[in-house]
């Protein structure tokens, strides 16, 4: 069943030095599954995710032939309709968690705000729910973290707070932009298993943007590989590490390995036809 | 000789009458020209140790020495030409209303260095960004592009020591390879000393000679690079990190 259908998405920034085409005709559809988006830095992964939520600030603009979420045309939705979807039915874990959290509000207030205002929960119930969400993402001392401000958190704690915040409203679609890049491998495994359960048991759709090709290969169902604003390859995640496309291959070959040689890592060869 | 000595250091934050013991009695030393890695649990105090070296965290016990001398508080103006840090959070560490050009040339101006234009262009080139990016603002860059600017800025003053907090976790494989190659080359050419944090054991293995594993504010186990690749760790925590990194092994 299709949850999200995106056809020919374009994101363009009109800058003083001319238009920057961040996304150039991306199409994909998402069911209740884990869709990975990989690709080099600046290839348009974040802008693709933000465009789905229509979170592109001017001078950026979004164009698409269609962008349907659960049957609703996001391109035609009013600002009010978009605000109602954001956070509640479509969540996004931002790439810069500390920047996305409110710096002058405690973590607890930020986590309970929506529960109290939108879901009408009392303070006690909202706090209990927030504490449980922090515990689920392996925060060691959730009570202290509830009272902390974002600058008092480590990088990975900020990331986990952001994930907890997005999961509390139980969205139907979660766009997670590098959600685990600041987590150690054991905490990362716990967080991924939460996301995995939500997809399998609750039927959430997940767009998982990541640079970590090995992680995506292990965790996702399908992968889009992006280059310069376009999808150059779409494949099953379990075949990602054996990808044949020279760009995907090139990215894989750049990775260091435990016990591997110390010399310079191979660089991506951009002379191929795919790069034109 | 040890260039950086972390000698029984503890860091305790006080927030709302609550004590947060971020680092508890941690000791290690980094030789001149060495690359030393910090790995471990999220929230275990890795960034705090780097910040403590820069005088940006409340050290409540122990001593930090560079070149055998305890560091003065505040750190003084010479510190910046000796030690530079690349922060974990590239967005928060760049001034949102300064162009990249200003971000990169400001340290030069403060330290009275000339040839600012040429140096800025060279620095961008060193981290693989086109010269036109000088006139952009941080919000006009992708996450990885911002991190490259942060690395370029740290290199502007040609420090002896680089403190690198997750320098490549925001970068794709190809830019990561370029940045790691750049860092290795600079270390060789300029005899730099690195203290770096990463969650990716493959990156740590590629870059570091020795490694300290941390958990919950404490040093758990120190090992050499060879011991990591051969799985010769002795503590269960270090072993669990290694086991969870099986997809990063050679072959
Ligand atoms: N406000 C802006 N003005 C001009 N160009 C922009 C703006 N915002 C983003 N861009 C450009 O759009 C392109 C795509 O950016 P995006 O953030 O989607 O990349 P990304 O794939 O998420 O990269 P990363 O992995 O580094 O986060 C980049 O080249 C970036 O420089
Ligand atoms: N300014 C502060 N005030 C209060 N507590 C703080 C402050 N800065 C850090 N802490 C706490 O210190 C502990 C260690 O944080 P630190 O940032 O050093 O962790 P880390 O090992 O770098 O983790 P990560 O891998 O997630 O970045 C955390 O519990 C954090 O909440
Ligand atoms: Mg991005
Ligand atoms: Mg940190």
Image (cartoon, rainbow, N blue to C red):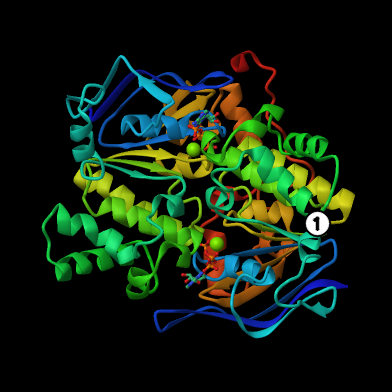
Q: Secondary structure at mark 1?
A: loop
Classify residue B49 as left or right of residue A162: right
Q: Toward the viewer: B148 or A78?
A: A78
Q: Position of residue B118 (x, y in %)?
A: 82, 35
Q: Is residue A151 left or right of residue A169?
A: right
Name the residue located 71 percent from the left edge and 34 percent from the top edge. Answer: B128
Quadrant of the image for the C terminus of chain B? top right
Q: Quadrant of the N terminus of chain B?
A: bottom right
Q: Quadrant of residue A115?
A: bottom left
Position of A37 relative to A156 (above/below): above
Task: Check the residue under mark 1 and report the chain it is in.
Answer: B
Of B164 and B75, which appears nearest the observer? B75
Q: Nearer the viewer, residue B52 or B183?
A: B52
Left or right side of B210 for A13: left
Residue A17 spot, x, y in % from top left: 59, 20
Up the image or down, A85 lies above or below B31; here it is above
Looking at the image, can residue A159 be seen? yes
For label 1, count other residues whose C-alpha is less than 10 Å away and answer few (under 14), some (14-19) or many (20+). Answer: some
The answer to whether residue A255 shows anywhere in this view is: no
Q: Picture coordinates of residue B50 (x, y %)?
A: 65, 66
Above or below for B122 versus B72: above
Q: Where does residue A231 sit, x and y in percent of width and height? A: 46, 22
Quadrant in which residue A190 is drawn: bottom left
Q: Which residue is mark 1?
A: B159
Farthest bottom residue in view: B61
Q: Is mark 1 within 8 Å of ligand 4?
A: no
Q: Is A113 placed above or below B95 here?
A: below
Nearer to the camera, A220 or B5? B5
Residue drawn at (85%, 73%) of the image? B67
Q: How many marks?
A: 1
Residue drawn at 80 percent across, 57 percent down: B159
């Amino acid at each position: 069943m299709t949850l999200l259908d995106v056809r020919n998405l374009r994101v363009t920034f009109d800058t003083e030095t001319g238009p920057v085409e961040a996304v150039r005709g991306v199409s994909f559809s998402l069911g209740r599954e884990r869709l990975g988006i990989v690709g080099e830095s600046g290839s348009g992964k974040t802008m693709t995710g933000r465009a789905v939520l229509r979170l592109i600030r001017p001078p950026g603009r979004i164009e698409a032939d269609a962008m349907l979420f659960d049957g609703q045309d996001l391109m035609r939705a009013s600002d009010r309709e978009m605000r109602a979807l954001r956070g509640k039915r479509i969540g996004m874990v931002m790439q810069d968690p500390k920047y996305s959290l409110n710096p002058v509000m405690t973590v607890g207030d930020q986590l309970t705000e929506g529960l109290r205002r939108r879901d009408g929960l009392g303070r006690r119930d909202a706090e209990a729910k927030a504490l449980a969400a922090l515990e689920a993402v392996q925060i060691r001392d959730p009570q202290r973290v509830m009272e902390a401000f974002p600058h008092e958190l480590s990088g990975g704690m900020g990331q986990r707070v952001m994930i907890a915040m997005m999961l509390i409203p139980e969205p139907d679609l979660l766009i997670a932009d590098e959600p685990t890049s600041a987590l150690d491998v054991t905490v990362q495994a716990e967080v991924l298993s939460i996301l995995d359960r939500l997809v399998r048991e609750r039927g959430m759709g997940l767009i998982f943007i990541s640079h970590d090709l090995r992680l995506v290969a292990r965790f996702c169902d399908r992968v889009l590989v992006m280059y310069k604003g376009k999808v150059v390859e779409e494949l099953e995640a379990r075949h990602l590490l054996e990808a044949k496309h020279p760009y995907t291959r090139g990215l894989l070959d750049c990775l260091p390995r435990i016990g591997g040689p110390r010399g310079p890592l191979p660089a991506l060869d951009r002379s191929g036809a795919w790069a034109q | 000789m040890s260039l950086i000595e972390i000698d029984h250091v503890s860091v305790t934050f006080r927030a709302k009458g609550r004590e947060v013991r971020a680092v508890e009695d941690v000791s290690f030393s980094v030789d001149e020209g060495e690359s030393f890695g910090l790995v471990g649990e999220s929230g275990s105090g890795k960034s705090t140790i780097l910040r403590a070296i820069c005088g940006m965290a409340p050290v409540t016990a122990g001593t930090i020495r560079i070149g055998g001398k305890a560091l003065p508080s505040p750190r003084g103006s010479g510190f910046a030409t000796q030690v530079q840090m690349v922060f974990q959070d590239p967005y928060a560490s760049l001034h949102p209303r300064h162009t990249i050009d200003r971000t990169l040339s400001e340290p030069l101006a403060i330290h009275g260095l000339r040839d600012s234009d040429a140096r800025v262009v060279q620095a961008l080139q060193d981290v693989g960004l086109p010269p036109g990016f000088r006139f952009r603002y941080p919000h006009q860059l992708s996450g990885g592009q911002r991190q490259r600017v942060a690395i370029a800025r740290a290199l502007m003053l040609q420090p002896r020591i680089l403190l690198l907090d997750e320098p490549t976790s925001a970068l794709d494989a190809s830019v990561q390879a370029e940045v790691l190659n750049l860092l290795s080359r600079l270390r060789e050419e300029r005899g730099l000393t690195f203290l770096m944090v990463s969650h990716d054991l493959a990156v740590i293995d590629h870059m570091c000679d020795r490694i300290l594993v941390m958990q919950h504010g404490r040093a758990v186990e120190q090992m050499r690079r060879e011991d990591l690749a051969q799985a010769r760790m002795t503590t269960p925590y270090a072993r669990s990190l290694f086991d969870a990194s099986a997809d990063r092994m050679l072959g």
